[in-house]
Every structure is written in structure tokens, then in C-alpha cells.
Image (cartoon, rainbow, N blue to C red):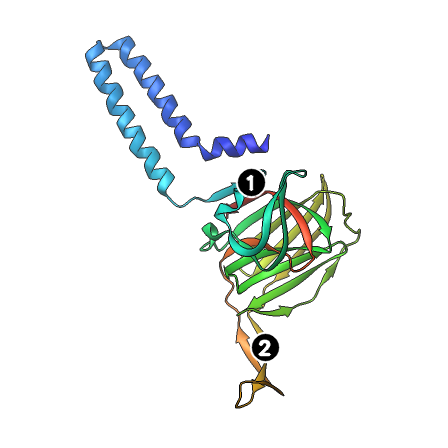
Amino acid sequence: MRKLKIFIRQYQYEFLAFLVNVVTASLAFLFTNQGVAFVLTIAVFTISIFVVIYFKTKDKDFYFASLDKPGSEKDWVGRGRFAYVRNENCFEITDSHAGYIFPKTANWDDYKFECEFKIVKMSLGCIVRAMNLSNYVMYQIFYDKVKPHLRINGEWIVTEENTFDENLKPDLWYKLTIICEKRSVRINIKDGKSSLFDRHFIIPPQIGVVYREVDEKGKETKRETKLLQNIDFDFGSIGFRNHGEERAFVRNVYLEML
């Protein structure tokens, strides 16, 4: 049912244009002569084509990626394995140190990100506010907790984790909803209609970063420098990331601008 609603929303202007043309042609041929009716029909058809083109070339405020067939990764950018799994009719994300992101939403600020997921081994990393593959916020979902990460210039900063009241199961699909509004990020995980996890996270405006000093030959030393660094994750795309043997299945990704 949801796929049908999304399909109608994706092609709403085409459906509306078709309906307007049918009604206009029918009324014209009923109440005018054939010559006038023909000209009026052509005029309305031409106008409707331009209207459809205008709305189709505008920036979209929602996207839906079912990830249920090979080649669905063409709109995603990343490195590692993000590929179709035939016997599950979905995509898997694994062995991807950088992750995969959906660049069509790179300039979005407030949005809702939904998907269905199943953890196969260890965890699923969900990316938000991604400016590129080296700078983003990631919420790593384990069977028993969510661990927030900040990736800044390729370096990882782990913040306070939140545990579940009830552990996730490796053989079940779950629905994930992430709502990003300014620096507030709400994460909800559902098993069917039951909510298993519903917490708010705050992206910090600043964070202390430790830099290791290097010697004259370019080698790291034991001396460290601690600096307070501003964090500017005010917009950015979504994605997934699993490193090494971490493995998860994902499908039915829905994105909507708020």
C-alpha cells in the first residue's frame, strides 16, 4: 500500500495532466465544433506538458529507494560492498570503511529518514548530515544499543551510547525512523507497531579533538595537542556504513524534507 502511495506521489503531475487533458477534450468536443475543440485540446496539452516539465525539474522534497533489484545502487556514492542480495530481495552493506551516501539530499537540513533493516552480523551504521565520505554523523545500531559517532576529516569521535530495554533479534526486520531537525536527532526503532527505542540525540556544536604531533621525518610522536573544534553538521545527505565483517540488510529507504 505504501509503495502505491509513493508511486502516485511521484507521478502526481503526470496523472493530473492526463486528467485535465481528458476532461478538456471531452468538454470541447461536446460543446464546440471539431476545429475549435482540436485547437483547444492541443493548447491545453502543450501547456500541461510545460507544467509537468517545470515541476519535474524542480528540486524534489522526497525520495524513495526500494533497493529491491540489482542496479539500485546507481544513485549512491561510496566504497566497499553495497549490493543486491537476491534471496532476501534487499541490499546489504558490509566491508565499507567509508560507507555509502545518497548525494541527492546533500543540501537538505531538516528531514525524515526511514528504512527497514535487519542486522546480520554485529551492527548497522546509519549516516546523517553527510557532507562527504569523510565528514558525517553516524548512529551505529547494535543488537543492544545505539552508539553515536562523529566522523571529522576521516577521524572518528565516539560519544555516549544508549542501550535498549529489549535487544534486537538477528532474524527479524525492523523499521528505523530518524528525524533530523537542526542539531536534534530523534531515532525510533519499531518491531511492527511496537516501539522498541525512541530517543533524542543532540549533535554538539563543539568537541575536543586530540591531534598527535609529528617529528621532522613526518612520524607520529607521543606528544599530543588538544584543540576545541567547531562542528558544522547543519545539513547533509543520508547513508549506510558497515566496516569489516559488520553486515546488515536494508530496504525501502524513504527520505522526506521537513
Q: Please name the amino acid that badge 2 sits on.
A: Val
Q: Which quadrant would residue 194 be assigned to in this image?
A: top right
Q: Please name the amino acid that badge 1 sits on.
A: Pro
- Looking at the rendered image, the disc whose residue lies closer to the viewer, 2 or 1, is 1
Left or right placement of residue 219 versus residue 61 in this view: right
- Indicate whether 76 appears above or below 43: below
- Indicate whether 108 appears above or below 148: above
Instruction: Tell me whether circle 2 and circle 1 mark residues in contact (CB < 8 Å).
Output: no
Instruction: Report the disc number at residue 111.
Output: none
Q: Viewer-proximal residue, 154 or 205?
A: 154
Residue 170: x and y, percent?
A: 76, 47
Badge 2 density bin: few <14, some 14–19, many ≥20, Cα 10 Å = some
Instruction: Report the disc number at residue 70.
Output: 1
Farthest-out residue, right: 166
Instruction: Report the disc number at residue 209.
Output: 2
Q: What element carries label 2?
A: strand
Q: Which residue is drawn at 20% across and 14% down?
A: 36
Mark 2 and mark 1 lie on one chain; the one further toward the N terminus is 1
Q: Which residue is drawn at 69% across and 48% down?
A: 189
- Indicate whether 197 appears above or below 202: above
Residue 39: x and y, percent?
A: 21, 19
Badge 1 density bin: few <14, some 14–19, many ≥20, Cα 10 Å = some
What separation in Å lies between label 2 and label 1 (alpha carbons)? 41 Å
Q: Which residue is drawn at 46% across and 35% down?
A: 10
Q: Which residue is drawn at 71% across and 49% down?
A: 119
Left or right placement of residue 249 versus residue 168 in this view: left
Residue 208: x and y, percent?
A: 59, 77
Residue 94: x and y, percent?
A: 64, 54
Q: Which quadrant would residue 89 be assigned to in this image?
A: top right
Q: What element carries label 1?
A: loop
